[in-house]
Image: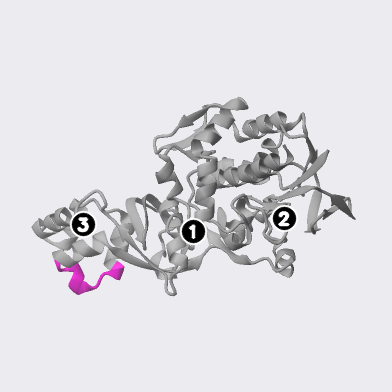
Amino acid sequence: MKRVIIIGGGPAGLMAATQLLKSDCEILLLDQKASVGRKFLVAGDGGFNLTHSETPSEFRDKYDSDWIKNTIRQFSNKDWIKFLKQIGIETKVGSSGKIFPADEIKPIQVLNAWKEFLASKVQFVLNTRFLNFDEKQVEVERDGKKEKLDFDYLVLALGGKSWPVTGSDGAWVQGFEEKGIIVTPFESSNSGLVLYENWIEGLEGKILKNIQTSCGNQSCSGDLVCTSYGLEGKPAYAINGALRKMEKPVFKVDLKPQMTPEKVFEILKKAKNPSQGLKELKMGEVAVFWIRNFVSKERFLNPKELAKAIKEFPIGIKGFRPIDEVISCAGGVAESEITESGELNRYPTVFVAGEMIDWDAPTGGYLIQGCVSSGYVAGKAISKIIN
């Protein structure tokens, strides 16, 4: 009987194991924590967004690499929803199109249902830390002792580097690089934006409602929250990728996206003065503060220029939040190092999956979907070989 070892009990590792259930093989799933799915549960604290209900093409466009897009084609958002139903988890579509577990179903219930589905065949080995691997063995540490385990196939779903308390600490990178495997450096993704101090002084906790951010070809509508260091919220996270590519990162905010530039100009032109115009436009406290402090007097007094500033308000950033506190990270094993199923070119029979691969996506269910889809293709590839 073939032995498949999976290291990492997040959604990528669990889905890889799922695809092997009907194969004639021994399945060991190892995790360095005392329980699997730690990041899965942490992600659920803010509302358990499992995937999104967009059409396949719209959905795939949210990802940044051809490899992950092809992976999503093989295991789509609809396939994920279908699997969840198979293990007894009903889902619902939120007002923004996001997919959540049905009412009253908590993240731990989803994880427990999945574990129960795997329990008949998968042997869970916990508190076991990955150290290294070669073509035939994986080295781990358990109870303070190092040991080498033989495998026929190995799936590494070791995570990226964000939220290291859940186990995603990026400790595996050095070993991969020593083997000549290219790993793109990890960077903060879906991160809050750190602004220069004078942009946020006295605004902590204030909300900039119903705006739209844009940078390069990325844009997003919603609310921004002012913090002690800058801005948080989906419109900030969604433009991370474009900002990372800029030497001097700057993005634009449409402070009145529900109005055309012409309508904004018309209201400002008819107002008895610019301040009255801002009131009639119902500009919020943060927007007014920014306009008064960062729009020149000449532009402020010119209705046409003020309208342009409101529709395309530029903001420069100092940087991103530290990687250990952001939702996800960009970077990881380079696409050039793996096959379409995640098998390492240098180490046939060794597969990688999940956030340890270099792909990026915004929040909104896309991160979990990318992980389960990459676990699916790895597990499916091994299953086809064994069978």
Q: Which residues are magenta?
A: 293-302
Snapshot quadrant of residue 278: bottom left
What's the residue type where badge 2 is placed? Pro
Return the x and y of residue 163 as percentages of the image width and height: 63, 54
Asked if the residues shown at circle 1 and circle 2 are in contact, with their CB atoms under 8 angstroms apart, the answer is no
As helix, strand or loop, the secondary structure at mark 1 comes to loop
As helix, strand or loop, the secondary structure at mark 2 comes to loop
Snapshot quadrant of residue 94: top left
Image colouring: one colour
> Is 184 above or below relative to 147?
below
Mark 1 is surrounded, within 10 Å at the Cα level, by few (under 14), some (14 to 19) or many (20 or more) other residues, namely many
What's the residue type where badge 1 is placed? Gly
Mark 3 vs mark 1: which is more N-terminal?
Answer: 1
Determine if residue 179 is in view: yes
Q: Is residue 296 magenta?
A: yes
Mark 1 vs mark 2: which is more N-terminal?
Answer: 1
Mark 3 vs mark 2: which is more N-terminal?
Answer: 3
Quarter of the rendering occupied by the C terminus: top right
Quarter of the rendering occupied by the N terminus: top right
Residue tagged 1? 192
Asked if the residues shown at circle 3 and circle 1 are in contact, with their CB atoms under 8 angstroms apart, the answer is no
Residue 278's disc is: 3
Return the x and y of residue 227 as percentages of the image width and height: 47, 58
Real-space Cα distance between discs 3 and 2?
63 Å
Residue tagged 2? 348
State the residue at coordinates (26%, 69%).
295
Q: Is 162 placed left or right of 240 in the picture? A: right
Asked if the residues shown at circle 3 and circle 2 are in contact, with their CB atoms under 8 angstroms apart, the answer is no
Determine if residue 11 is in view: no
Mark 3 is surrounded, within 10 Å at the Cα level, by few (under 14), some (14 to 19) or many (20 or more) other residues, namely many
